[in-house]
Image (cartoon, rainbow, N blue to C red):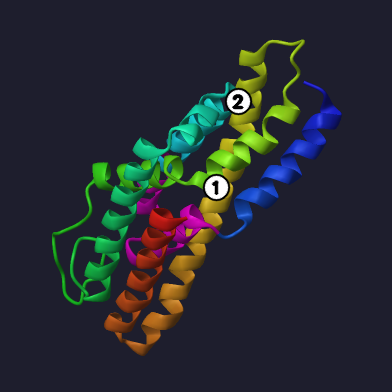
Amino acid sequence: MNLALLSAFIPTFFFVSITPGMCMTLAMTLGMTIGVKRALWMMFGELTGVAMVAVLASIGVAALLLNYPSAFTALKLLGGLYLAYVGIQMWLSKGKMAIKMESSDRVASVFELLSQGFVTAIANPKGWAFFIALLPPFLNPNQSLASQLLILIAIILCLEFTCLLIYATGGRTLKSVLMKSGNVRIMNRIAGTLMMGVGGWLAIG
């Protein structure tokens, strides 16, 4: 690919990824509550969703979804309601995502974490609109679309993963600072409020 295009593409998408949004807030919340290591499963689900959105946007399927939004809206609402429910459970210091006040074997499953990340990525209308607007200008119609997409999506996923790690690590650091007060309930309420915010954002965004 043209190196000049790549030199513009990389900082553009890094800026987009690092900007606070639903996925980054989710990463920070999970980094705070379940730790960076287990939050990696959510990140893998989110990256899978981002890759799917990028591919579909580049070949125009996204435009079709936006023209017939009923199924898309249903997915957004269901995903948003689920994340809001998880947030309420965390706020009440209950559920699998909450920081435990005492030892417990109840933890979020790998599937739950993967699905949270995937649904948040694919049900984010701003993500679809963003890829429709920004990805096509970096594609050269006179060259192989598949090879260009492979390179660009690989770069996008690396940038997105880096930013998710930054936010999750920030959440873990915030937890270590706030936990010095010894008040687990306050931590759960902060994390639960963030999670409910992500759910509401997803449902009505």
Residue 98 vertical position relative to residue 52 in the rendered view, above or below: below
Q: Is 20 in the magenta?
A: no
Would residue 96 be seen by someone viewing this image from the given angle?
yes
* Residue drawn at x 28%, y 49% as measured from the top left: 78
Q: Which residues are magenta?
A: 21-44
Residue nearest the viewer, comparing 6 with 136: 136
- Residue 18 placed where, x, y %? 62, 55
Q: Is 31 in the magenta?
A: yes
The residue that label 2 is drawn on is 58
Would residue 161 be seen by someone viewing this image from the given angle?
no
Residue 5 vertical position relative to residue 182 in the rendered view, above or below: above
Instruction: Categorize mark 2 by other alpha carbons within 10 Å: few (<14), some (14-19), many (20+).
Output: many
Residue 57 falls in image quadrant = top right
Q: Give the SS element for disc 1.
A: helix
Question: The residue under label 1 is which amino acid type?
Answer: Lys
Q: Earlier in the sequence, mark 1 or mark 2?
A: 2
* Residue drawn at x 20%, y 56% as measured from the top left: 107
Task: Specify the principal SS of the magenta part.
Answer: helix
* Residue drawn at x 62%, y 34% as measured from the top left: 132
- Residue 12 placed where, x, y %? 73, 44
Q: Quadrant of the N terminus?
A: top right
Residue 178 vertical position relative to residue 104 in the rendered view, above or below: below
- Residue 201 placed where, x, y %? 44, 60
Proximity of marks 1 and 2: CB atoms separated by less than 8 Å: no
Asked if residue 168 lies left or right of residue 139, the reply is left
Query: Gap in Å between the C-alphas at discs 1 and 2?
Result: 15 Å
Q: Give the SS element for disc 2.
A: helix
- Residue 143 placed where, x, y %? 74, 11
Residue nearest the viewer, comparing 194 with 110: 194
The residue that label 1 is drawn on is 126
